[in-house]
Amino acid sequence: MRRDEFDTHLNGLLLSAERLIPEKNLPDLPYMESAPTVHDWYDFELELWKTGEDIRQLILSDRKELNAEQADRVCKICVDIRAKRGRQSFIMLLGKKRYVSYADRIAAVLTDEDIDGHIISTLYKMGASQYIEKIKPYTDHAVAWIRNEAKRYIKKYGV
């Protein structure tokens, strides 16, 4: 696929994602019966998450990267709390050294439980080593994979 075709397709996916985000922050849904410590997902969260994954697949299949405007749009979705857990796949899109300039923006929402583990993983992949003190508390996180991501980060970037 040519770059202009890639950009058209990617920009369409980003527009779809942006339109899925509700105008107001919605309350968490009740806990799932099958996972009593996890809130159920809104339909828009699932669609948004899938759109982020569709973008990842497009990038992989076409071996192209986000341009600056596209990366900015991805980052805006990442930090928009109204998008809830749908942001997870978008945060992972920035998990490359070339996107380290977005580290401060996503680290600013690290305390958001919907995306905290994804942020830690992405900061690690970015090579953003300046968040040791912010990530240390997550080494005792109740969720094993988040705890392990925090330990991996601290092991690599800690003193």
Image (spheres, rainbow, N blue to C red):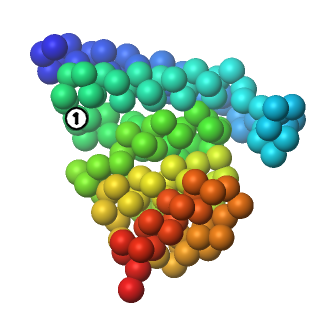
Q: Secondary structure at mark 1?
A: loop
For image coordinates 36% across by 45% down, the residue present is 94
In the rendered image, the quadrant that contains the C terminus is bottom left
- In this view, which residue lies farthest toward the bottom? 159
For image coordinates 59% across by 62% down, the residue present is 147
As drawn, is 29 to the left or to the right of 72? right
For image coordinates 86% across by 31% down, the residue present is 33
Where is mark 1, residue-wise? 65
As drawn, is 83 to the left or to the right of 31? left
Say if residue 27 shows up in the picture.
Answer: no
**Position of 16 relative to 131 (above/below):** above
Instruction: Determine the image quadrant of residue 57.
Output: top left
Return the residue nearer the eye: 18 or 138. 138
Q: Position of residue 27 (x, y in %)?
A: 80, 39
Q: Position of residue 50 (x, y in %)?
A: 51, 23
For image coordinates 81% across by 46% down, the residue present is 37
Q: Position of residue 58 (x, y in %)?
A: 30, 22
Q: Position of residue 21 (x, y in %)?
A: 60, 28
**Position of 141 relative to 125 (above/below):** below
As drawn, is 4 to the left or to the right of 51? left
